[in-house]
Amino acid sequence: MRLLSGVLLAILAGCASAQSPAMPGAMTPGAAVAPARSAANDGAREANSPKNWSLIYVSNAVGTVTVYRYWQRLYYATLTGFATPKGECTDQTGDVFITDSTLEEIVEYGHGGSTPINVISDAGYQPYACSVDPTSGKLAVANYLDAKGDAGNVAIYKTFNSKPQYYNPFLEGYGPLTCAYDDNGNLLIATEYSVGSYEYAALSRLKRYYHRFVRVDMPYIKKERPYEYITNVQWDGKYWAITSAGNISRFTITNLIDRYEGTTTLSANENGPGQVWISNATGDLSEQGTQVVAAESSGAVLYWKYPAGGSAFASISDYLDAPYGVAVSPKISSGSER
């Protein structure tokens, strides 16, 4: 049985025993209750506002998304009402989008918000990841499977209330598992496929203003890691960052051929890695990130320096259950929070 399929089935089985979820958006106690209004506590309330914090959102197999202060790694709140929350992404304003493969929808929250500001229907498909184009605001959704369990597609929403444009799988019989935009509006998607008993990685790119995906050749991965599938792609502000077997390989893609730029080794990220998020303090996609976080299905989110990698320097483990998706929403206000 394929490793990825086994992990997915285990997650789905764990969620199947739960009761039917409520409407997405409930927040369990985590943020402090606001004190009575007075001039004396207005300053304290402003200082404790989530707009002053960078927040990390983590999806769990039990149908929750836990939120933490990113730099302090302190628990903030739990968002409930999901069935199987998967990959996550953010836009330029700090809004967070959470895909739900069972409910077939993408739920949007404002930075630090307690209830959804939008629920986007992805009916007929099982979304596993998303990315927002910083040049246009389009939302791309990687539908790994359709409702019948067959290969999915890529759905691109020009506006969140419009019908999406669908792109057929770039590899017959296999849907995209992960996706990411760069700072120029080019979209990269990835999946894994089987040949006999081996797993192979495949990449395809939709260039800005183009209308079809084109397969990207991968001589380095084929040579160095021919049987390892890709679990995550992201733009790090300078290079394409492709996660395989717990490590991040950096590439420049020119004329649909990858040029290897180096590898970031994420020690302790080999067992059950989920989504990886490369973070910088400003959220500027044209600025290379300085830290990377990864969700580990064993029950933790780990932090590394980027692109140095090596041993993790910090972790989060409270209120997590087989985490999969992770995204960082930078603080909205100006000034330092560390």
Image (cartoon, rainbow, N blue to C red):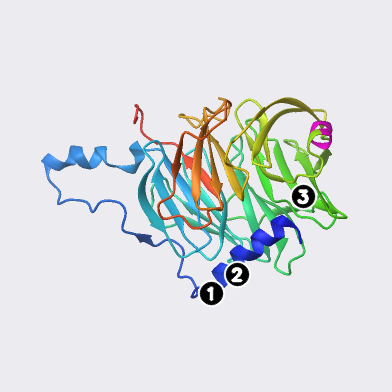
Residue 67 can be seen, yes or no: yes
Residue under pointer 2: 13
Q: If the image is split into quadrants, where does the C terminus sit?
A: top left
Q: Secondary structure at mark 3?
A: strand
Q: Could you tell whether 122 is left or right of 77 in the image?
A: right
Q: Secondary structure at mark 2?
A: helix
Which residue is at a point 58% across and 26% down the rendered structure image? 307
* Relative to 302, residue 272 above or below: below
Residue under pointer 1: 17
Residue under pointer 3: 192
Q: Residue 255's image quarter?
A: top right
As shown in the figure, which amino acid type bears the numbered disc 3? Glu
Give the spatial CA distance, label 2 vs label 1. 7 Å
Residue 222 shown in magenta: yes
The stretch of residues the image draws in magenta is 219-223
As shown in the figure, which amino acid type bears the numbered disc 2? Ala
Residue 144 can be seen, yes or no: no
- Furthest toward the right, the residue is 196
